Amino acid sequence: MTTAIVLAAGKSERMGAGTDKAFLSLVNKPVVAWSLLAFERCPAIDRIILAVRKDQQVAAKAVAKMFGIHKLVKIVPGGNKRQDSVKAALAACDFDTKIVVVHDGARPLVTNEMIEEVVKLAKRLPAVTVGHRMTDTVKRVEKGVTVAETVDRAKLWQVQTPQAFQYKALKSAYETLDPKTEVTDDCQAVELTDKEAKVQIFETKAPNFKITTVEDLHIAAALLK
């Protein structure tokens, strides 16, 4: 079985105090509903687990009911850090889960192709992520705004979600990871704890940005209309 873990427990600090971007309106749906519907409609996904803030669990149930998210089997309270939310969702997976797909609920432009491709690759690889090549010139800055050097962008990629894993690989990674280490994505947990593991990127050119500001919300709305 393949279980999708949708993360929507972030603090949304760049949106302003007290704002939960996962439940902001985007066109005609809450932001998180777009991701939930993408996984609901994807044949490669069997179940969905949603991680939200404790105070949003009732709202999350209402969204699932309103938009017919029948694959949603559990809603778990998210933690203070991304990895805490992922670990809570992993613990809630049913025993027959073989593949897990982790996705940021604030990426509403996720496509069926992205989901299906990472799931297909994860059947033979421990970890897979969606990403695209860097096209802008990249500068390294040590302090302030003074450039220290120009980095060769030929070897640089920007990675996003969904990220797919063999369940045992991701669970083992988080069990092994030093609790003091904070990772910025789940592939990093695998990279840090299993030097033999090969993390592969599925290249996409489709827009798949994460909503972090009001401007992002406006751009996503224009693309989804």
Image (cartoon, rainbow, N blue to C red):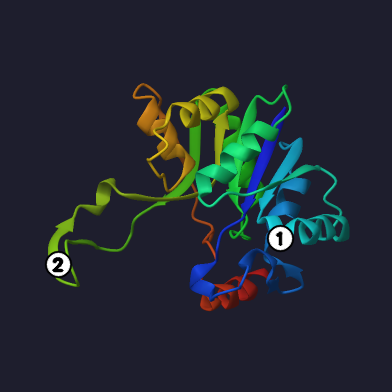
Residue 9, how many percent across, how many down?
61, 56
> Extreme left residue here?
148
Tell me the element at label 1.
helix
Quadrant for the C terminus, please.
bottom right
Residue 201's image quarter? Answer: top left
Q: Which residue sits at x=72%, y=37%?
A: 45
Q: Is residue 222 above or below residue 50?
A: below
Q: Which residue sits at x=78%, y=62%?
A: 59
Residue 23, how many percent across, how many down?
69, 67
Q: Is residue 105 above or below residue 21?
A: above
Amino acid type, mark 2: Val
Q: Residues within 10 Å of mark 2 (few under 14, many from 20)?
A: few
Of circles 2 and 1, the one toward us is 1
Residue 19's image quarter? Answer: bottom right
What residue does disc 1 label? 55
What residue does disc 2 label? 147
Amino acid type, mark 1: Asp
Q: Which residue sits at x=60%, y=73%?
A: 18
Distance (Cα) linking label 2 and label 1: 43 Å
Q: Is residue 128 left or right of residue 141?
A: right
Residue 204, how many percent across, how many down?
50, 50
Disc on the earlier residue, 2 or 1: 1
Q: Is residue 132 left or right of residue 86?
A: left
Q: Nearer the viewer, residue 8 or 17?
A: 17
Q: Is residue 117 visible?
A: no
Q: Is residue 100 above or below residue 40?
A: above
Q: Is residue 123 above or below residue 71?
A: above
Residue 55, how many percent across, how many down?
71, 60
Residue 164's image quarter? Answer: top right
Q: Is residue 208 visible?
A: yes
Q: Residues within 10 Å of mark 1 (few under 14, many from 20)?
A: few
